Amino acid sequence: MKLPDKVMNCIVVFNKDKDKVLFCKRKKEPFKDRLNFVGGKVEPGEASEAAAYRELQEETGISRRQIRLYRLMDLTYYYQDFILEIYDGRLNEDVVLKEETNPLLWLPLDEDYTDRERFAGEQNIAHIINIALMYPLPPLHETVG
């Protein structure tokens, strides 16, 4: 089976204390009115990491100097014809969010992220958060070995 051409990203953003996760409330389909991670499309010819930082800046106002993103996993959706690249990161400082289109909110880690009525996707948000929590996120100034 051929790999999909379309590439999207989602960014799991933890607050500075890593006890809350950033979500947007989608204004359009798919998953209109449900909560999802911020993210968007990787433009043709654009590097994946650059696209993640660009989407994060556009949708939240969070800049590269405020967070370091790590590629956590990729999900390939053959029948929907796209690859979803998942990044995660922890803010280096408290930030004032700047909404582009979708309202933004912080949710605590004890939410029921499997609630299909409230969250986008097919219960994969809970899985993604659980995987992201398994790995320590070093402060912005540290390098990963």
Image (cartoon, grey):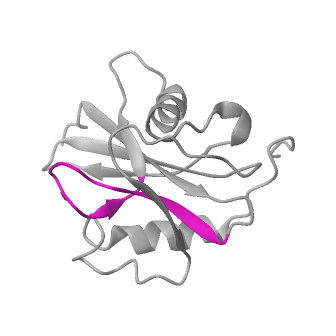
Closer to us: 122 or 81: 122
Q: Visible in this render: residue 9?
A: no
Q: Is residue 113 above or below residue 34?
A: below
Q: Quadrant of the N terminus?
A: top left
User: Residue 137 appears at what percent x and percent y?
Assistant: 73, 57
Residue 23 x, y percent position in the rendering? 44, 59
- Look at the image and tell me whether residue 2 can be seen: yes
Of 51 and 145, nearer the camera is: 51
Residue at 63% across / 43% down in the picture?
Answer: 69
- Tell me: 1 left or right of 134: left
Name the residue located 74 percent from the left edge and 63 percent from the top edge: 136
The correct choice, above or below, for 30 with respect to 21 in the image is above
Question: As drawn, which residue projects farthest toward the top?
Answer: 45
- Where residue 59 sits: x, y (%)? 44, 38
Residues in magenta, as a range: 19-37
Q: Image point 20% across, 37% down: which residue?
A: 2
Viewed as shown, does residue 19 lie left or right of 113? right
The answer to which of 106 and 116 lies nearer the viewer is 106
* Vertical placement of residue 133 versus 93, above or below: below
Find residue 99 and report its horizontal and vertical position in percent. 43, 42
Report the number of discs: 0
Residue, far right: 142
Q: Is residue 124 magenta?
A: no
- Asked whether, in this view, residue 126 is left or right of residue 49, the answer is left
